[in-house]
Amino acid sequence: MKALLEKLCRQRRLEREEWEGLLARRREIDRAGLFSRAEAERRRHFGDAVFVRGLIECSSFCKNDCRYCGIRRSNRRAARYRLDRATVLACCEKGYEWGFRTFVLQAGEDPGLTPEGVAETVRAIKARFPDCAVTLSLGEFPREVYQLWFDAGADRYLLRHETADPDHYACLHPPELTLAHRLDCLRDLKDIGYQVGAGFMVGSPGQSARTLAADFCFLQEFRPHMVGLGPFIPQKDTPFAAEPAGTLEDTLLLLALVRLTLPRALLPATTALGTIHPQGRELGILAGANVVMPNLSPPAVRGKYALYDNKLCTGDEAAEHLAGLKKRLKAIGCTVAVSRGDFPGAEGEAKNKC
């Protein structure tokens, strides 16, 4: 195990068989040592800065029927809403006053959010807040739609790959969604010029050391600018309602391994991580994460964007409680960064030993 970790620190990559062996025996890893290395890598490239992104959950409508998701189209109990442009801009206005310089527009794959409508919203945000970055997380679209939004001013796009194993992907998604198409979308986004986020759920039904090895091989080859990684949490109205949640221990360990693989990547300590443990986000940062996404959505709709059960929506993860978040980060030796927090580049990663 030690030899594999040393190789990962030197080369920033392992062979698939090595990944599978390491992940199959991950309970044997010295976690304190691993987290210390990952935190040192984070501080080497980012100092004590943790970047905040203002999350605006624009719509809970979705045309897809993913088996793990609470806003899947067949869930008739899901509370549906869609924010208009004026409401989104009002959320940005508040966020800007509080110090946010990145706004993340997230939604299900909602046909009501038309490509040109989204482009107009992006243009309006960039016109009013030219010093801010706009991140979109709206799902799979044709390349020309991604180009439209990029030309309108969008800077980043988050599209978690969920799993890089095609059989596992089919277990999680309906037949009309394929891993090959998801990966094509990610490649289109990167080719257009977006800063791109990929990522996967930890502990999703059917996940194994083999599927996780595929995830890490994909990450080390694709080299996304951001990796969204959080625990699977079941939602009561989905086919996976009775499945066990992903664990804190595995999520932290995999976060640390991603940090050693992609030292300069932006890694969120997710709301899902905070949902399964009261100090989940702080523990995530101590394991190598360097991004948090407080919720800027109108309070009346936060509970309706129910991707999973018991989602946090009223505490320090809420944007209006940014002071509380700053206090919690200060307690672990970190500060909130108010800059855009762009990806610093990948040049020389493999040469930086941990």
Image (cartoon, grey):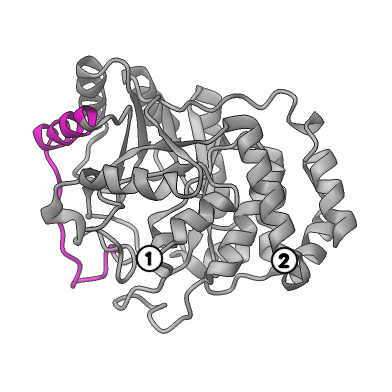
> Which of 238/296 is in front?
296
Q: Identify the residue at image location x=48%, y=80%.
A: 244
| Callout 1 amino acid | Thr
x then y, percent, for residue 213:
72, 59
x then y, percent, for residue 339:
40, 24
x then y, percent, for residue 279:
43, 62
> Which of 230/96 is in front?
96
Q: Is residue 266 visible?
A: yes
Element under disc 1: helix
Left of 228 or right of it: where is 12? Answer: right
Q: Quick one: quadrant of the N terminus? A: bottom right
Q: Quick one: quadrant of the C terminus? A: top right
Disc nearest the viewer among 1 and 2: 1
Q: Magenta residues, as a range?
A: 71-97
Left of 154 or right of it: where is 333? Answer: right
Q: Identify the residue at image location x=69%, y=61%.
A: 32
| Callout 2 amino acid | Arg
Q: In which quarter of the image is residue 223?
A: top right
Left of 284 or right of it: where is 152? Answer: left
Quick check: is 78 in the magenta stretch?
Answer: yes
What mark, if any, has residue 210 been given in the picture? 2
Quick check: is 155 in the magenta stretch?
Answer: no
What mark, if any, has residue 275 been given in the picture? 1
Of callouts 1 and 2, which one flags the residue occurring earlier in the amino acid sequence?
2
Q: Quadrant of residue 156?
A: top left
Q: Above or below — where is 55 with respect to 177? A: above
Q: Above or below — where is 153 with respect to 322? A: above
Q: How far apart are marks 1 and 2 (CA)?
A: 27 Å
In the current view of this chain or complex, which residue is farthest to the bottom?
A: 242
What mark, if any, has residue 332 been given in the picture? none
Does the CB distance between marks 1 and 2 fall below 8 Å? no
Q: Above or below — where is 119 with respect to 277? A: above
